[in-house]
Amino acid sequence: MKIKIGEELLNEHIRVRIRLDYKGEGKNGRFFFGGKSKEEIAEQKREEQVALLRNIPLQGIVIEDIDLSLDVYSVSEFEGRKNREYAFAPVILSLRVDNLDDLLPLVLRSEFRKIEFLSPENLEIYRLDAERLLFRVHQLIQEEIKKLERKYLN
């Protein structure tokens, strides 16, 4: 990303903070034991995903910090007559990226909740960057549609 300060163009990374909330739904175990609570499932899912983020590099993304200090929280959702309980285990990622389109794999996840730009203070997106960003969004959405079609039509 190029930042213009006066007449000078500088190359600066974009720094962001992203919040992802991993969902857990309680499972009943066999007989009286063996089941996990929704909180345990959410925490386990969070730990698995954080391990993947630490060990598998994402193109164009440098993970500066992973914050797991937020507590697991529960939400009730009414579906008709049923009341379903879910637990969410949040994680906050501090990232450094070269381009906005490098963020798309994280932002398009179902776990994505919030993004905060830390630097630079102002972003100027050029026409070609906006075109590339929108084209990449289109590609990722089409990939998701194909996955869902394979899952439900086969």
Image (cartoon, rainbow, N blue to C red):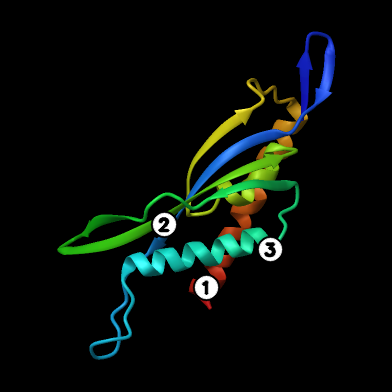
**Residue occupied by mark 2:** 89
Residue 35: assigned label: none
Residue 136 visible, this orientation: no
Residue 80 visible from this viewpoint: yes
Residue in the image at 63% along x and 21% along y: 121
Determine whether, in the image, residue 119 is placed left or right of residue 40: right
Instruction: Residue at 40% x, 64% y: name it.
Output: 42
Task: Tell me how far mark 2 sits from mark 3, CA to CA.
Answer: 20 Å
Q: Nearer the viewer, mark 1 or mark 3?
A: 3
Q: Residue at x 25, y 56 (%)?
A: 77
Which residue is identified by label 3? 55
Neighbourhood count class around disc 1 (C-alpha, 10 Å): few under 14, some 14–19, many 20 upward: few
Residue 129 or 2: which is nearer the viewer?
Answer: 2
Left of 84 or right of it: where is 81?
left
In the structure shown, which secondary structural element does the residue marked by tag 1 occupy? Answer: helix
Residue type, numbered disc 2: Ala
Residue type at mark 1?
A: Lys
Residue 102: x %, y % from top left: 70, 45
Q: CA distance from mark 1 to mark 3?
A: 28 Å
Q: In the image, is residue 75 above or below residue 38?
A: above
Choose the circle earlier in sequence order: 1 or 3. 3
Residue 130 in percent (x, y) is at 70, 32
The earlier-in-sequence mark between 2 and 3 is 3
Point out which mark residue 151 bears.
Answer: 1
Q: Residue furthest right?
A: 8
Q: Check disc 3 and give the amino acid type.
A: Asn
Percent position (x, y) of residue 80? 18, 61
Q: Quadrant of the N terminus?
A: top right
